[in-house]
Image: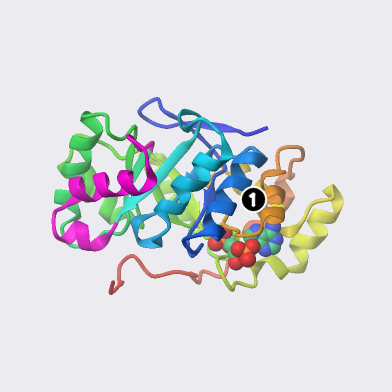
Amino acid sequence: SDAAITLNNGVTIPQLGLGVFQTPQGEETIGAVRSALQAGYRHIDTAMIYRNEESVGEGIRQSGVDRRDIFLTTKLWNDDIRAGKAREACYRSMDRLGVDYLDLYLIHWPADGWERAWEQMVELYRERRVRAIGVSNFQQHHLESLLAMSGTKPQVDQIESSPQFVNQELVDAVHTKRIDVEAYSPLGGTGGSLLSDPLLARIGEQYGKSPAQVVIRWHLQRGVIVLPKSTHAERIRQNFDVFDFALDDAQMRAIAALDTGRRNGADPDHFDF
Ligand code: A2P
């Protein structure tokens, strides 16, 4: 079964969630969300900019799983950050999702104006429209600015992390601040070659698991929240079947040694969107 993490405000979050980045609006997203919830996932991670919030909401309703049993995250996009419109953006996201609260709302990127957006997120949190708030793509220096200016700590920082781009220094720095880490592109991202590394196949053979399952297990054992993405029902199910084996320390280290130091996604210190 699933594992849970207790965030720094006492809210619990399932450690494994379905990511829906680049999953297109319509039947693909509806089906992915429905399959995930039917397979036992209770955590879905979307964003305004993925443009599939309506379909995520529809998938939740079609699954028959109670909304209150699902941990639902969405994110505030950069245009709304720059415009100082966090509150309006949050309401619009909830409308599209068809829900009256969010479990987690994140500042998607440290775009100009994020400091003001953070104060608006804190208000939404105090008003209980969102059960937890956080940031994404924040480097250590962004987090330090935030902590220096605000009395309210984020519950999470969602960052790129995988065996290909481990990002361990940032992971450790975030954990040291008692903030949880969520790993995006945990399998190396779309179009990546990580999953074809023979080390992962070799380790997987020992447990009857696929490379993707080995990587997801690696994330769980290092204590991060992990958000693998797939549009295929069979892979979605497979990615949740990771609670019946454990990697040993040597395997954990060998997987971390696949680190190339190269990101799959954009650099949070130099992005232009
Ligand atoms: P697809 O959506 O076609 O299944 P990340 O989570 O790091 O962003 O990586 C997701 C990529 O890995 C996607 O391209 C996804 O493709 C693929 N993927 C997800 N789960 C599996 C799996 N169990 N086996 C192989 N590939 C997978």
Tell me if residue 101 is in the magenta stretch: yes
Which image quadrant: the C terminus?
bottom left
User: Count the marks: how many?
Assistant: 1
Q: What percent of the width, then of the height, locates residue 39?
A: 67, 41
Q: What percent of the width, then of the height, locates residue 142?
A: 26, 54
Residue underneath mark 1:
216
Q: What percent of the width, then of the height, locates residue 107?
A: 29, 51
Give the SS element for disc 1: helix
Which image quadrant: the N terminus?
top right
Q: Is residue 82 above or below residue 34?
A: below
Q: Amino acid at mark 1?
A: Ile
**Residue at 35% in and 61% down:** 49
Whether residue 237 is visible here, answered yes or no, is yes
In this picture, residue 272 sits left or right of residue 236: left
By secondary structure, the bulk of the magenta-drawn segment is best described as: helix
- Magenta residue span: 77-103
Q: Which quadrant of the frame does ligand 1 lie within?
A: bottom right
